[in-house]
Amino acid sequence: MTLPLVILIMTIAIGAMSLQSAKLQLINVAAMVASAVARGEPAELIDQLVATAGEQVAFELEELEDSICVKLSVATPIAGMEIGFLELAEKQCARASGQ
């Protein structure tokens, strides 16, 4: 009786660590993309940076008064299985260069 419970708890813990890892990757990539856009880097480089976050990452760009904000979001399977999806999103901003 206790072995299935231990396996369930371990599965939940591993799934939570996996989601946290994916979230940290989104934070890092969103910050790099925001900085690159603010510096005026070419679109090809921006696309390559976004692709490092995964295959099906949604990309939104928002230009504010003195900064550029980038929002990346991705649907991640819950517990590594396609029983449901959880949307992870991250928004990072960088000060616009040349203004």
Image (cartoon, rainbow, N blue to C red):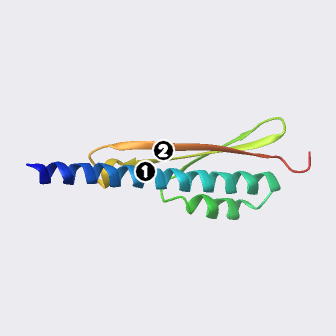
- The answer to whether the residues at label 2 and label 1 have Cβ atoms under 8 Å apart is yes
Mark 2: give few (<14), some (14-19) or many (20+) Cα within 10 Å.
some
Q: Where residue 67 appears, x then y in whole percent?
A: 80, 41
Dot label at residue 30: none
Dot label at residue 88: 2
Relative to 2, 34 lies left or right: right
Q: In this view, does 19 lie above or below 54?
A: above
Identify the image quadrant of residue 68: top right
Q: Which of 24 and 73 is in front in this view?
A: 24
What residue do we see at 68% from left, 59% from top? 46
Dot label at residue 19: 1
Q: Which quadrant: the C terminus?
A: top right
SS at mark 1 in the image: helix
Residue that protrudes farthest toward the left in the picture: 1
SS at mark 2 in the image: strand
Task: Specify the amino acid type for callout 2.
Answer: Leu
Q: Marks 2 and 1, Cα distance to the nearest angstrom?
A: 8 Å
Identify the image quadrant of residue 45: bottom right
